[in-house]
Image (tube, rainbow, N blue to C red):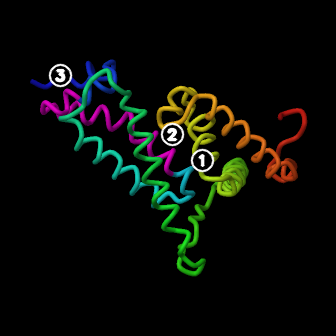
Amino acid sequence: MEMPSDALTTLPDDALLVLYANGDRHAAQALTARLLPRVFRQARHMLGDASEAEDVAQDAMVRLWRIAPDWRQGEAQVTTWLYRVTANLCTDRLRKRRGVGLDEIAEPEDPAPSAAQRLQDRARGDALQQALDQLPERQRQAVVLRHIEGLPNPEIADVMEISPRAVESLTARGKRALAALLAGRRAELGYDDETA
């Protein structure tokens, strides 16, 4: 029996996954609406490419649907599992990229912004992505999960399969590296001392 769509919005992720495994298509829709944007953002920040991020996000969600019948409620958080799968899929793509020449990589998207603020926001986002791209893989993953996705350190530790103390270390080193990479660009990106 399917639950009404509005009643599903208050259920935790693992309950929705179990309902989906039992045939409730509304539960799948509610869980997709809740989780797909998060997974896409994580992949976009790790890969720096929206098209690849869409592929990874879809692949991660398909894997979630496949394991739904075997999901054991209470053992792990659905988001932790999904972030880990997404991180692994991104890592696989990043490793494959290393052997690709620059001429074979598609040009990045260049949307035509309609206002000065959108231009500035884009410049800031690009600067952040370029700086993230220069971080070691594990630091990048920790920084994205903590400071962009807003996950708590214990959940990041589960995703990355490391200790919370190692997460703290990775994020601290990543933040310092990002600050150093972006330090000379404050004026260019529209930051002044009063608004920082």
Asked if residue 34 lies in the magenta stretch, the reply is: yes
How would you classify the magenta stretch by its main secondary structure?
A: helix
Residue at the far right in the pictured view: 193
Horizontal placement of 81 versus 111: left or right? left
- At label 3, the amino acid type is Met
Horizontal placement of 1 versus 152: left or right? left
Label 1 near label 2: C-beta < 8 Å? yes
Asked if residue 51 lies in the magenta stretch, the reply is: no
Horizontal placement of 42 versus 125: left or right? left
Instruction: Measure how far apart labels 1 and 3 are at the Cα level.
Output: 40 Å
| Foreground of the two, 56 or 174 | 174
| Foreground of the two, 167 or 66 | 167
Query: Which quadrant holds residue 56?
Result: bottom left
Instruction: Measure how far apart labels 2 and 1 are at the Cα level.
Output: 8 Å
Residue shown at the point (9%, 24%) measured from the top left = 1
Q: Which residue is mark 3?
A: 3
Region in magenta = 18-43
Q: Position of residue 168 (x, y in %)?
A: 66, 31
- At label 2, the amino acid type is Met
| Foreground of the two, 88 or 102 | 88
- Circle 3 — which element? loop
Q: Which residue is mark 1?
A: 138
Residue shown at the point (63%, 29%) measured from the top left = 165
- At label 1, the amino acid type is Arg
Residue 160 numbered mark, or none: 2
Depth check, mark 1 against mark 3: the one in front is: 1
Q: Position of residue 110 (x, y in %)?
A: 60, 64
Q: Earlier in the sequence, mark 2 or mark 3?
A: 3
